[in-house]
Image: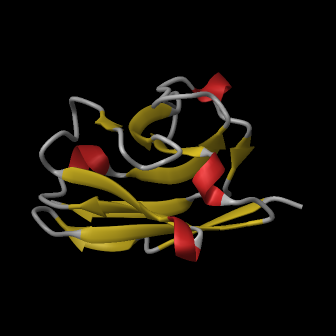
């Protein structure tokens, strides 16, 4: 049974940093592309960042480029999202997801496994 479990969310002041983790079980992370998405109340789930299966290629949404960084440790079966210079607009539930689509897909329907999410709250 595949499980993705996010952690690391919480309350942070604007300008602060958080590192989210996504621990995978039931799958070998090295064979899957991984993505981070976020969803604010009343909004659609939106793409944040993705890492290809081998970790060579990464892609970040324009809204987070230069502030967020996706990385992965396949030996630990864990993917990370380092978030710096957080803004109130970044406040959302953050989800990690796994895809067997090549590259760094940015659409939700490309991802087959999803975590339950972790909340990030940014105070101004």
Apparent side of residue 24 relative to residue 42 in the rendered image (left or right): right
Give the answer, above or below, for where 78 lies relative to 30. below
Q: Image point 56% across, 28% down: which residue?
A: 102
Q: Quadrant of the N terminus?
A: bottom right
Give the answer, above or below, for where 37 lies relative to 42. below
Q: Position of residue 30 (x, y in %)?
A: 59, 55
Give the answer, above or below, for where 107 lies relative to 98. above
Q: Image point 64% across, 26% down: which residue?
A: 110
Apparent side of residue 23 relative to residue 20 in the rendered image (left or right): right
Q: Position of residue 25 (x, y in %)?
A: 74, 68
Q: Quadrant of the C terminus?
A: bottom left
Q: Position of residue 90 (x, y in %)?
A: 29, 48
Give the answer, above or below, for where 23 lies relative to 105. below
Q: Image point 44% across, 74% down: which residue?
A: 8
60 or 76, nearer to the observer: 76
Q: Image point 55% across, 76% down: which residue?
A: 76
Tell me the quarter of the picture where residue 50 sits.
top left
Q: Position of residue 34 (x, y in %)?
A: 53, 46
């Amino acid at each position: 049974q595949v499980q993705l479990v996010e952690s690391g969310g919480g309350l942070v002041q604007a300008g602060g940093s958080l590192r989210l983790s996504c621990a995978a079980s039931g799958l070998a992370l090295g064979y899957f592309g991984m993505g981070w998405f976020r969803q604010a109340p009343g909004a659609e789930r939106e793409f944040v960042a993705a890492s290809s299966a081998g970790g060579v290629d990464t892609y970040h949404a324009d809204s987070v480029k230069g502030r967020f960084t996706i990385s992965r440790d396949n030996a630990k079966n864990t993917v990370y999202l380092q978030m710096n210079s957080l803004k109130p607009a970044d406040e959302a539930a953050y989800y990690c997801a796994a895809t067997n689509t090549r590259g760094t897909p940015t659409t939700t329907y490309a991802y087959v496994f999803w975590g339950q999410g972790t909340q990030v709250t940014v105070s101004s």
